[in-house]
Amino acid sequence: MRLNLLLVPLVTASCSVGSASQSVSVAPPESCLTGQIFSVGTDFAPATILRLDGGEEAHITGDRENRIRVLGGTVVTVCGELTTDARNVSTIEAQSFELRAVDGMTAYLGTLQEVDGGWQLNPERSGAPVPLSGVPEQLGEAEGSLVWVAGNWEDETFSVKSFGLMERS
């Protein structure tokens, strides 16, 4: 009996070397990936997945994950630290992201602002304001809020065909 108790620490030590959950960095400090967003899991254990064109997937983590999860079904570029664990599961800790497309249409994310009787979207990331046309009354009521707009460029303005409210101001 005494011999068995002496072996327990030895067995425990030999089983604890290395872990499948350890992450090993495989990319530069900041990488950017573009793909479609999927919300998976349950209310108690939600997860956000970025599916790339080739079918590869990366789990999204970090402070921006919740905001990205709301954009399920859209095409987004996510930038951050990319790691792969021992089971070959990729994870990107989102430090920034940019909305690219909604339902196949070009899309932008930013704060809606009325300027000189017209509308513009001030991008969440750096960049010039996007002049908007075809802003429906319902979208106009969200002035000052974080919204996404999808549509196409016509002449010098972006024609809004679809929109969504991310955060009300």
Image (tube, rainbow, N blue to C red):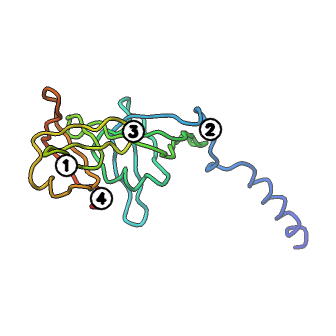
Kindly indicate whether the residue at mark 2 contacts the one at mark 4 (C-beta within 8 angstroms): no
Q: Mark 4 points at which residue?
A: 167
Amino acid under disc 1 = Glu
Kindly indicate whether the residue at mark 3 contacts the one at mark 2 (C-beta within 8 angstroms): no
- Residue 130: x and y in percent read 25, 37
Q: Which of marks 4 and 3 is in front?
A: 3
Which labelled disc corresponds to residue 147?
none
Q: Mark 1 points at which residue?
A: 114
Q: Name the residue under label 3.
A: 126
Instruction: Please tell me how many numbered marks the rendered image carries.
Output: 4
Q: Nearer the viewer, mark 2 or mark 3?
A: 3
Q: Give the spatial CA distance, label 1 vs label 3.
A: 19 Å
Say whether residue 86 is left or right of residue 17.
left
Q: Name the residue under label 2.
A: 25
Q: What element carries label 2?
A: strand
Kindly indicate whether the residue at mark 3 contacts the one at mark 4 (C-beta within 8 angstroms): no
- Residue 117: x and y in percent read 13, 46
Q: Give the spatial CA distance, label 4 vs label 1.
A: 17 Å
